Amino acid sequence: MTATTAAGPAITTTVHGGVGTIEISNPDRRNALSVSMMFDLADTVHALNSDADVRVVVLRGAGEEAFVSGADLSEFGGRTQEAQQHSDQASESMFARLSEVSVPLIARIHGYCLGAGVAIALNADLRCADTRAVLSIPAARLGIGYPLAQTADLVHTVGPSAAADLLYTGRRVPAVEAQALGLLDRVVETEGLGEVVDELAATIAGNAPLSVRAAKAAIRSVRRTTESAPDHDEIRRGALAEIARCGTSGDLREGTAAFLEKRAPRFTGR
């Protein structure tokens, strides 16, 4: 895949060195997501997850001002019930695809990360941000009922009390505090964010793909079991199968041989 350029709202992708990058672009609205963009993002995430050459996915916003500033509220005015259902379908499809990603997902966050932007980031395995980043879930300021699934992600990440604070007040949280709460994993100076994310993604992409997938499946299984999810047995079986697959893989033989021969391994994902 190669990136395409567009003046208006767009979801673009690149794949290089095992890293798939998704860029969310809506320059006139600080990368707010329209309904059509949500559907496009769902399709893009699914396509990258199905690409055998992709070992890690990076999500980022276009430009320098925002990661994602939420849903595009310009579409909310005078919304019919049919339009609301269409919007709900778009959101559900987007988050379902994000939750299905089997390779590591990294959110590269700069500037504003609001509402749906926070929800997208919480679907990432790792969240890296610059010191200018500001996170907020302003649902209560807009009369929006924050979705249950996304509330669960928030509670799991920061705990019920901090989730209550964020949802009840809708306040804006600077990057340093967001890291302390667990919303962010790494916070770096603006000029260093790209280098940090690129290095992190390259490191992951250079490791054994089956091992990394197994680790993600195991983490997901533990999380879902902790949440007492109804599908946790199925998820657990899937994780055990991914772990077992590593034990008979060519990558295990290659990794062992490379270690003994004191050379860099050449993993193929088989």
Image (cartoon, helix red, strand yellow):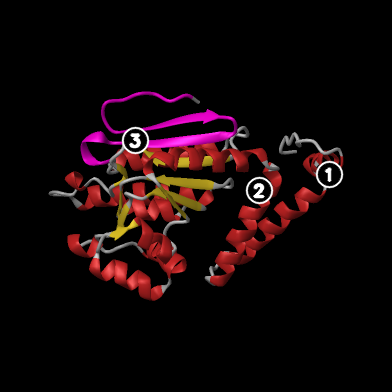
Q: Amino acid at mark 1?
A: Thr
* Cα–Cα gap, marks 1 and 3: 41 Å
Q: Amino acid at mark 2?
A: Val
**Does the magenta run of residues contain 5?**
yes
Along the polypeptide, which appears first: circle 2 or circle 3? 3
Label 2 sits on a secondary structure element that is helix
Along the polypeptide, which appears first: circle 1 or circle 2? 2
* Cα–Cα gap, marks 2 and 3: 28 Å
The tag on residue 62 is: 3
Region of the chain picked out in magenta, as a range: 2-30
Report x, y in % for residue 55. 60, 39
Residue under numbered circle 1: 256
Q: Residues within 10 Å of mark 3 (few under 14, many from 20)?
A: many
Q: Quadrant of residue 176?
A: bottom left
Residue 188 in the figure: left or right of residue 26:
right
Residue under numbered circle 2: 212
* Residue occupying image coordinates x 57% and y 37%: 50
Q: Quadrant of residue 145?
A: bottom left
Q: Are marks 1 and 3 in contact (CB under 8 Å)?
A: no
